[in-house]
Image (tube, helix red, strand yellow):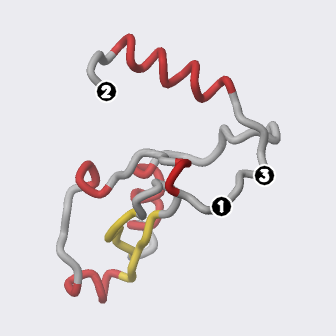
Amino acid sequence: MWDYTDYMGCSLQCYTDLFEKHQYTLVCCNLPGINAFFVRNEFAPLFTKYPIDAIYQPYRFYLSTITAAQQPSLKYLKNKLEALLIKPGL
């Protein structure tokens, strides 16, 4: 259940897996890391195929002109810091 914070959504891999089942292919993400773009498989050959790691963009709030309506979440920061402790250099 949504707790009215900015901690929401799912991974790009989850979206990619879901949309593949419905005949869609991931083609790009926008630079702020807010949107992922999928096309129907029939149009996928019109785009260069890249692995998901090359398409993924981290969230860059400072590049977005959209003002967040949700309260900032310390849960996101906590999880990000824990990931850095587990995987140094990220």
Q: Mark 1 to mark 3: distance in Å?
A: 9 Å
Q: Position of residue 37 (x, y in %)?
A: 43, 71
Residue at 53%, 49% (x, y): give it: 62
The answer to whether one can see residue 69 in this image is: yes
Query: In the picture, which quadrant includes the N terminus?
Result: top right
Q: Mark 2 to mark 3: distance in Å?
A: 28 Å
Which label's residue is closer to the chain start, 2 or 3?
A: 3
* CB within 8 Å, label 2 to label 3: no
Which label's residue is closer to the chain start, 2 or 1?
A: 1
Q: Is residue 68 left or right of residue 60?
A: right
Q: For this rendering, which residue is in front, 79 or 30?
A: 30
The residue that disc 3 covers is 69
Residue 72: quadrant of the picture = top right
Crowd class of label 2 (few under 14; some 14 to 19; many from 20; radius 10 Å) = few
Residue at 54%, 22% (x, y): give it: 79
The residue that disc 1 covers is 66
* CB within 8 Å, label 1 to label 3: no
